[in-house]
Amino acid sequence: MASAASRYIGGCGQPAPDGNLDVPQRPSHIFEEMLAAARGIAAVTIGDKRAASYFDFSPRGLAGSFIAFLVATAFSAYLPHLTGGASAGVPTSRLLLMAGLLFTVQLGFSALVLRQLKRLDGFIPYLVADNWATFFVTAVSSLLTILGFSGDAAVLLVGILVLVIEINIARLVVGLKGWQIAMLLLAQLVGVGFGLLLAGLVVPIPADLIAASP
C-alpha cells in the first residue's frame, strides 16, 4: 500500500491525477514552507485526511524540515538559560549531543521497522512531518514554560499532544494500519531506551554532578 504522501506529486500541494483535493501549492521559500507545515501539523492533530498534502517531501522540503528540527533542538537546549533554570553541571553542548544521539538512534529504529513492514517509501514523509512536529511541539512547550506553566499538568498535556501527533503521522502521512502503528511506536520507545543507555556511555554524567545530586 502506497503512503498517503505518494498521492501528491512533488510532496506538497500537487494532487495526484485522480485526486481533486483543494490543497496548497508547493511553498516558494522557508517561511511559506513553515506556514504550510503549521497547517499540516494542525491537520495531523485533528486527524484531517488531507494532512500529508501540506508537507513538502522533496529534497528541499526535507532540508527545510531538518533546519526546523535543529532550531527547535537548539532552542530547547538554551531555553533554561533564558528562564534561569539552567544546571551548572550539564553543559549545553552535552545536551545537544545527547539530543542528536537520541534522534539518530530513534530514527534508525523507525527505519528498520518501516523496512520490515515493506513501507520504507514512507520514511521520508514520516521524517519531514516528524521534524516539523518537533519544531511546533517545542514551540508550544517552550511557550508554556516561559509563561510559567511547567508543572505536571503541562507535561501531561504536551505528552498527550505528542502521542496523538505521532499516531496520526503514522496513520495519515505514512499510511500505516493499526498494528503497524503499534510496531512503529514500540520501536521508537525501544530506540529511545537504547539511545539513553548509549548516551550514558558516550556522554556520561560528570562524577561531581552525580555526587551533588540528592
Image: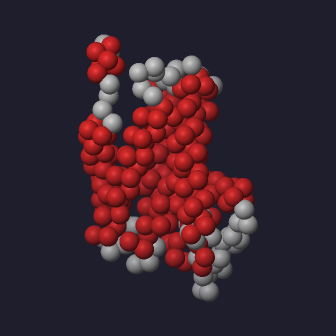
User: Residue 107 location, x and y as percent?
Assistant: 38, 56
Rendered view: 103 above or below 61? above
Q: Quadrant of the C terminus?
A: top left
* Horizontal side of residue 207 vs 96, given as left or right: left
Residue at image coords 46%, 39% = 96
Q: Residue at x 46, y 73 (%)?
A: 3
User: In the shown orientation, is residue 111 left or right of residue 8?
Assistant: left
Q: Find residue 58 and report its horizontal and vertical position in percent.
A: 58, 71
In depth, the one of 96 and 138 nearer the eye is: 96
> Which quadrant of the structure image shows residue 27?
bottom right
Image quadrant of residue 64? Answer: bottom right
Q: Is residue 195 left or right of residue 63?
A: left
Q: Residue at x 38, y 71 (%)?
A: 120
Q: How many marks?
A: 0
Q: Is residue 141 visible?
A: no
Q: Nearer the viewer, residue 185 or 205?
A: 205
Question: 18 or 122, which lies in front?
Answer: 122
Residue at 47% over, 60% down? 127
Tell me the quadrant of the picture where the N terminus can be found: bottom left
| Residue 144 x %, y % | 59, 30
Can the viewer see residue 28 in this picture?
yes
Q: Residue furthest bottom?
A: 17
Indicate the colouring scheme.
secondary structure
Q: Position of residue 20 (x, y in %)?
A: 66, 80
